[in-house]
Image (cartoon, rainbow, N blue to C red):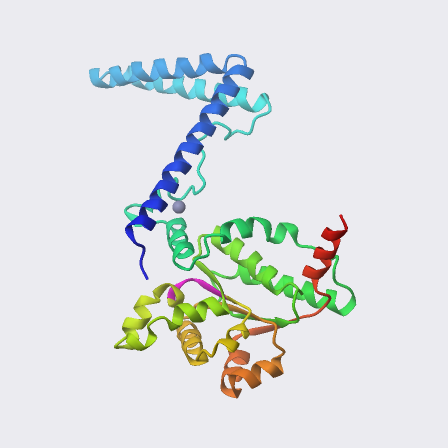
Amino acid sequence: MALNNTQYDAIIREYEDKQTRNRHLLEERTAEVYAKVDGYRTLCESISTISVMQGKKLLDGDAHALTDLHSEIQNLISMKNQLLVSAGYPADYLEPVYDCPNCKDTGYIKGAKCHCFKQKVIDILYEQSGIQELLKRENFSVLSYQYYEGEDLERFQNTVNACRNFIKTFDSDYHNLFFYGTVGTGKSFLSECIAKELIEKGCSVIYSSSVKLFETLSVNIYDYKSKSVYSDSNADLYGCDLLIIDDLGTEYSRNVNPAILFSLLNERHINRKSTIISTNLSLEDFRNLYSDRIFSRISNQYSIYKFTGPDIRMIKKRLQNRK
Ligand SMILES: [Zn+2]
């Protein structure tokens, strides 16, 4: 799949908006510091006057004068920085602000698409444009153990540690995770935590419900003449750094052919691209639904984690209703 022009233009506009927003933020900060920090503005003005002089001397070819001016500018800069910090501001308070420092919010690095651009393309193509907002809410910063007790708690803590380790070693180790357990026990939440951390690290992540994934994979599958053409058209699904499939099993009522999914998983495995699967099915139901062969493949290639405990979503809903 590829972006159409409207979608591409929308991304570019988003980058422009980002640049404008961050430029304004910097202007506001500068105005604030000028107003609050005595002498700061004068120092800035002196620096720019001397810089202009330096430019003139450079044209004159006066090497000696250039060295003097250079050290004078350095002096003023360090005075200026000291002034800022002693007024209680962070040292980088007046540095340019970027959402993505790698591409400085241009979307490109030396003519090639930045990871943030690639992720944006994925978000649009896989209709996960809401994901960035979702990940702002659902991430490790709101992780809570309060809903778990006893064995459930121990199990959940172990799984959280495994997830943190998955993130830490993601660049060096190839690893797949399989989460199973009853509804509302934290499977999707931990998948979202991982997605957020890895997107921030610059990895490409597709997060898809099983139903949606089957829809995407099924589109025109019978029209493709060869396997390679088919793979090309779903290149992101085959090639993204991490594919997260939520709620595997829910697609089953829709009469889909599971083989198309497992051929994708197999291909990703061969290319050592990680996948996380979560399902509400028990292992036994999973085996019955998808065959022994698929089950044994999953148990060989995935670290399997069981989730148990009360339905947290229900508890939260009940608490909210009480308010
Ligand atoms: Zn970027």
Left or right: residue 224 compared with residue 181 = left
Left or right: residue 287 compared with residue 262 = right
Residue 250 lies in magenta, yes or no?
A: no
Residue 242 lies in magenta, yes or no?
A: yes
Q: Nearer the viewer, residue 115 or 13?
A: 13
124 lies above or below 215: above
Q: Position of residue 156 (x, y in %)?
A: 68, 65
Residue at the bottom extreme of this rendering: 292
Report the residue at 54% width, 59% height from top: 167
Left or right: residue 193 compared with residue 119 = right
Q: Position of residue 292 (x, y in %)?
A: 53, 87
Quadrant of residue 124 in the image?
A: bottom left
Report the residue at 55% width, 29% height from top: 90
Q: Which residues are magenta?
A: 239-244
1 lies above or below 129: below
Quadrant of residue 302 in the image?
A: bottom right
Q: Position of residue 233 (x, y in %)?
A: 31, 67
Report the residue at 48% width, 19% height from top: 31
The answer to whether residue 3 is visible is yes
256 lies above or below 45: below
Q: Position of residue 139 (x, y in %)?
A: 59, 53
Residue at the right extreme of this rendering: 150
Residue at the left extreme of this rendering: 60
Report the residue at 40% width, 66% height from top: 237
Q: Nearer the viewer, residue 190 or 271?
A: 190
The answer to whether residue 174 is visible is no
178 lies above or below 46: below
- Which quadrant of the rendered structure holds the N terminus? bottom left
